[in-house]
Amino acid sequence: ATLYFLVRAWTAPLIARHVSGSFLRLFAVDAARLGDSNERRINGEYSLVELGLLAGQGGGLDAGLSATFIMFMVIGPVARTVSQMALLLLPWPLPELRHLHRLSRNVSVFYALEVFVLVVPLLDMTISDLANGMLTPANFPLCGDLDARYGGARLGVWGGE
């Protein structure tokens, strides 16, 4: 059951980004010039694993952050779950099972399911407010110029459905 819920949590849409207003109109003008629709790349839904992988696309320390995320949220939980299932199901002699149990306990250091259980709902509740206040005319003066030229700005991020 743990592995099933892990896979569901990794692959379910966690957040959806929706951009409208002056930003989208600016990109639409640029897209029309290039003969492409940027809207499909601007708006979208992202799962937890996709967010972790996107975080590392910048390279350098970002890649280290992404690798740490993948280690604690994917590799560690899978290794722990598989080793626990092996302990229950494999008909090995007792010394090998004890060795596997020690290995499983060591793997549990790279296991952050408690954090996972807290972070996913908190992220779902808070990301909208955080993202909606990111770019405003008050903190990003270009917003005022874009709003005047293309209409009101709106950058929205919502929890996954």
Image (cartoon, rainbow, N blue to C red):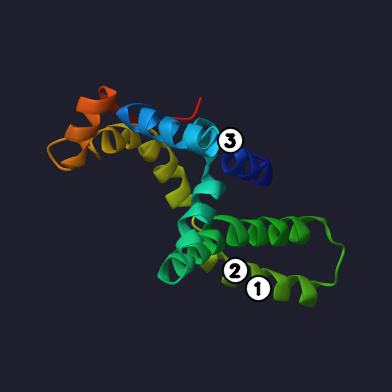
Residue 107, numbered label: 2
Picture quadrant of residue 84: bottom right
Q: Is residue 155 left or right of residue 55?
A: left
Closer to the camera in the image, 29 or 50: 29
Question: Residue 5: x and y, percent?
Answer: 62, 40
Q: Residue at x 21, y 36 (%)?
A: 143
Q: Which amino acid does label 2 sit on?
A: Val
The residue carrying mark 1 is 103
Q: What residue type is labelled 1?
A: Leu
Q: What residue type is labelled 3?
A: Ala
Q: Residue at x 41, y 70 (%)?
A: 61
Query: SS at mark 1?
Result: helix
Q: How crowded is mark 3: few (under 14 residues within 10 Å), some or many (20 or more)?
A: some
Q: Residues within 10 Å of mark 1 (few under 14, many from 20)?
A: some
Query: SS at mark 3?
Result: loop
User: Would you say residue 152 is visible in this rendering?
Assistant: yes
Question: Which residue is at the far top?
Answer: 151
Q: Mark 2–mark 1 contact, CB under 8 Å?
A: yes
